[in-house]
Amino acid sequence: MNKKISLAIDAFYNGQNCAQSIIKAYVNELKFDEQQALDMALGFGGGMGKMQKACGTVTGAYMLIGLRNAKAISDVDERKEKTPEMVRAFREKFCQRHQTDQCVHLLGCDIRTEAGQQTFKEKQLKDKVCSKCIESSINILDELFAE
């Protein structure tokens, strides 16, 4: 397993949310302040504030695309053009792999309710869905960053 994937999944199982786990995986590669970035990503877990909108692994990836491009592309106009292109490419690849980027549809339950939280646990969705989203998000980011 890719070192970044292992790091992210370990973070996810040890208190970080899905968005934070993606961010944590790229601290060394992109050289940014880890705590500040984790604080910034705190509200994006569970599909943005646990509203189950865009998956936290996706929003975490979008943040990393912006940060990576800020470091890699010096021309501001080019960066403003390339970053949305990469975000769209990321979303397309993620949706090809998972059919959606919406947390509620990925999980198939409402984690804001007690019944949904019970379903999440009983169906082991942390293992069966969330971990797979972490893995594919990192793989997609690595593909995009290599281009």
Image: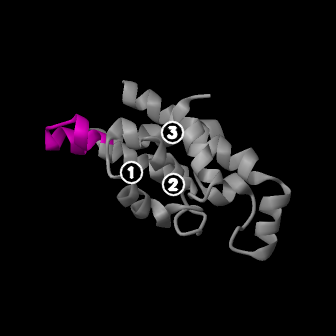
Q: Can you identify the residue that label 2 sits on?
A: 19
Q: How many residues crowd around disc 3 within 10 Å: few (fewer than 14), some, or many (20 or more)?
A: some
Whichever of labels 3 and 2 marks the residue nearer the N terminus, that label is 2
Kind of residue at disc 2: Ala
Is residue 20 something that shows in the picture? Answer: yes
**Gap in Å between the C-alphas at discs 3 and 2?**
18 Å
Q: CA distance from mark 1 to mark 3?
A: 16 Å
| Residue at the right extreme of this rendering | 122
Is there CB contact under 8 Å for labels 3 and 2?
Answer: no
- To which residue does mark 3 refer? 92
126 or 84, nearer to the observer: 126
Front position among marks 1 and 3 = 1
Farthest residue toward the top?
Answer: 147
Q: Any mark on residue 63, and which?
A: 1
Quarter of the picture containing the C terminus is top left
* Residue under the image location 74 percent in, 47 percent down: 127
Which residue is more in the foreground, 35 or 118? Answer: 35
User: In the image, residue 112 lies at what x, y percent?
Assistant: 68, 73
User: Which comes before the other along the chain, label 1 or label 3?
Assistant: 1
SS majority, magenta: helix
Magenta-colored span: 68-80
Q: CA distance from mark 1 to mark 2?
A: 9 Å
- Which amino acid is tagged 3? Glu
Q: Assign a secondary structure to mark 2.
A: helix
* Labelled pair 1, 2 in contact (Cβ < 8 Å): yes
